[in-house]
Image (cartoon, helix red, strand yellow):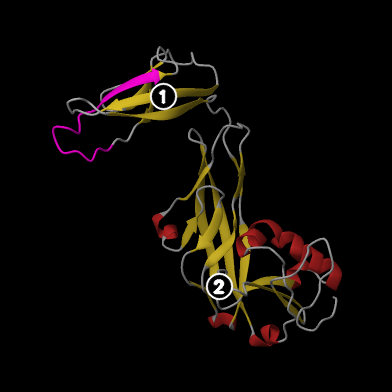
Amino acid sequence: MSVFTLSVTDADLDPNGPPFNYDIIAGLKNDFYVDGAGVIRSAAAAGRHATGAYQLTVRVFDNGTPALYSDVDVTVAVVERSSSPPVVTPLSATVTVGGGDDAVFAGGVVGRVGASDADAADRLVFAVVDDDDRRLFDVDAADGSLRAVGELDVGEYAVNVSVSDGRFTRYAVARLTVEGVGDDARDSAVVVRLDSLTPEEFVGHHMTSFVLALESQLHVRNTAIKVATSSSSFTGLLCEQVYGDSFQFRRRQFQLSGNVTSAGSGNTV
């Protein structure tokens, strides 16, 4: 069974470089070997190895006379085969930008597709499935953060995202609404600063709690509170704005468990 392929380079020209010879000089020599192509293989029957980490030291010889060599340490991790598929939490997000119906979202992180797996050793990998979707969106393979890679017009978007643990693959549709608001709401903004948060952290982990806190403080429905971007997009210095009725807020210094302080007027809401 193939475990890992070594990558070997040699600055010497022929005949002093390849072909290379391999030998395991430390570790479980009876359970692993390296073939002529540099592939580490298991010599044991399938399932014989107990789960855990196995340390090997591989020596690689060149074809010179005398042959020179280098050593490399290799860790082989044996884990249980995945038995549970990922559980995916679909994403539904709304991005609000100024400019009314002619508004354009400049691009950036719009939220995070959540996923979990009962198999602790599994590493989940996220991907955008359809080619057409990949022209507009990208997803972080490790944490599921969904990003618009370019400008988006006002409208509805549905993105098919896959999550794989190496054996099982599950799919979810991430839904995004881009809506525009008039300049009156933006011009009457009260600035709120969120301390020590990146835009990605805010959108992925704190936005829902932020909106709920404002709903409670302002005594309005959460449907009246929108999270909007500045024209510089999520990657700019002023990245998120929130407004509710006649109030509007920008990002930088707001503690979700504390008071909401207006940096623009100096008042506590």
Dot 2 amino acid type: Ser
* Residue toward you, 110 or 55: 55
Q: Position of residue 190 (x, y in %)?
A: 75, 81
Res. 34 in view: no
Residue 57 — which label? Answer: 1
- Quadrant in which the C terminus appears: bottom right
* Residue toward you, 85 or 206: 206
Q: Position of residue 192 (x, y in %)?
A: 74, 74
Q: Is residue 21 magenta?
A: yes
Element carrying mark 2 = loop
- Quadrant in which the N terminus appears: top left
Q: Categorize mark 1 by other alpha carbons within 10 Å: few (<14), some (14-19), many (20+).
A: some
Element carrying mark 1 = strand
Q: Categorize mark 2 by other alpha carbons within 10 Å: few (<14), some (14-19), many (20+).
A: many
Question: In the figure, 188 relative to 154: above or below?
Answer: below
Residue at image location 54% in from the left, 57% down from the top? 146
Left/right of residue 247 with respect to residue 127 in the rendered view: right
Residue 157 — which label? Answer: none
Mark whose residue sits in front, 1 or 2: 1
How far separated are the C-alphas under marks 1 and 2?
49 Å
